[in-house]
Image: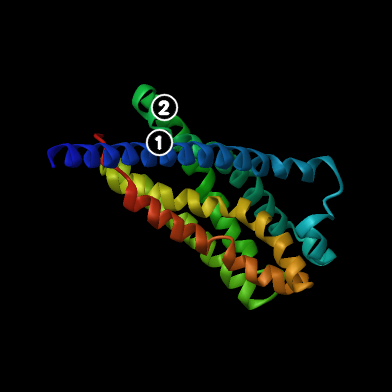
Amino acid sequence: MMNLRWHTSNITAHNNVLLQMDFNMAQRISRIMIALLATVIGLYPAIYFIQDRRFGLLSSKSNELLSNTAWNIGFYTHIILGGIALLIGWIQFSSKLRLQNLSIHRVIGKIYVACVLPASLAGIGIGFFATGGLITATGFICLGIIWFTTTLLAYQKIRQLQVEQHRKLMVYSYAACFAAVTLRIWLPLLISAFGDFIIAYSVVAWLCWVPNMLVAGLIVRRLKPVSA
């Protein structure tokens, strides 16, 4: 009887180890994928300076809007600073960097915040002119508000040495930032499904960030406490 219990206990422990190994592997793969996608989309705004900008999402804009100085300032502020934030934001989730190079972590964090605050405000501004009308505009404006708010609160929390709250808010902040990636994944699929750009764009204005926030909530629940 004792041997049977010992054998069962060993099997259970072995299975738990295998599950943990699978989970760790899945985490590594997901981090690599996030880094690759963030890098590609983070560099995407450079295309607007290389070729004629009347392509992609801008192809749906009117000539009047494209010639508007205020809108152009908002648009380029949003894509350039937002692109930088996307490029560097994922690095901040490296516990190795935080533990071994805290000063670098802080510098990157300050750059991220300095990019996100104006980029999100610009996103809110140009959101009012989003193609597709009220539903689309509301989706992107809500995204901009969430991005701005979570980032500002995260910065305030770390200034107050509330590390755990800072970490949680930064997960939500980068989930909002990562909407730039998920939008470009979902949009072609939605266009194919609906056969209409306007409908697809109205849906993606919400779909690009709402699931991200749900995933961020799950990640926040699994975060392990760390020392400041």
Q: Is residue 161 left or right of residue 45?
A: left
Check the image and report above or below for 30 versus 214: above
Residue drawn at the location 43% of the way across and 33% of the way down: 94
Q: How many marks?
A: 2
Of all residues shown, which one is farthest toward the right? 52
Estimate the x, y position of residue 65 in percent, counting from the top left: 77, 64
Quickly name the residue at label 1: 21
The one nearer the camera, 122 or 18, is: 18
Badge 2 or badge 1: first in the primary sequence: 1
Q: Identify residue type, mark 1.
A: Met
Using the numbered discs, state the Cα–Cα distance from disc 2 to disc 1 in whole angstroms: 22 Å
Residue drawn at the location 63% of the way across and 77% of the way down: 134
Of all residues shown, which one is farthest toward the front? 1
Contact flag, marks 2 and 1 (Cβ < 8 Å): no
Of all residues shown, which one is farthest toward the top? 100
Front of the two marks 2 and 1 = 1
Residue drawn at the location 64% of the way across and 42% of the way down: 42
Check the image and report above or below for 146 versus 99: below
Estimate the x, y position of residue 215 in percent, counting from the top left: 45, 56
Query: For residue 88, which quarter of the picture?
Result: top right
The one nearer the camera, 185 or 52, is: 185
The one nearer the camera, 98 or 111, is: 98
Query: For residue 159, which quarter of the picture?
Result: top left
Coloration of the structure image:
rainbow
Estimate the x, y position of residue 228 in percent, counting from the top left: 26, 34
Q: Identify residue type, mark 2.
A: Leu
Quickly name the residue at label 2: 97
Residue 40 in sight: yes
Local secondary structure at mark 2: helix
Estimate the x, y position of residue 149 in percent, counting from the top left: 43, 57
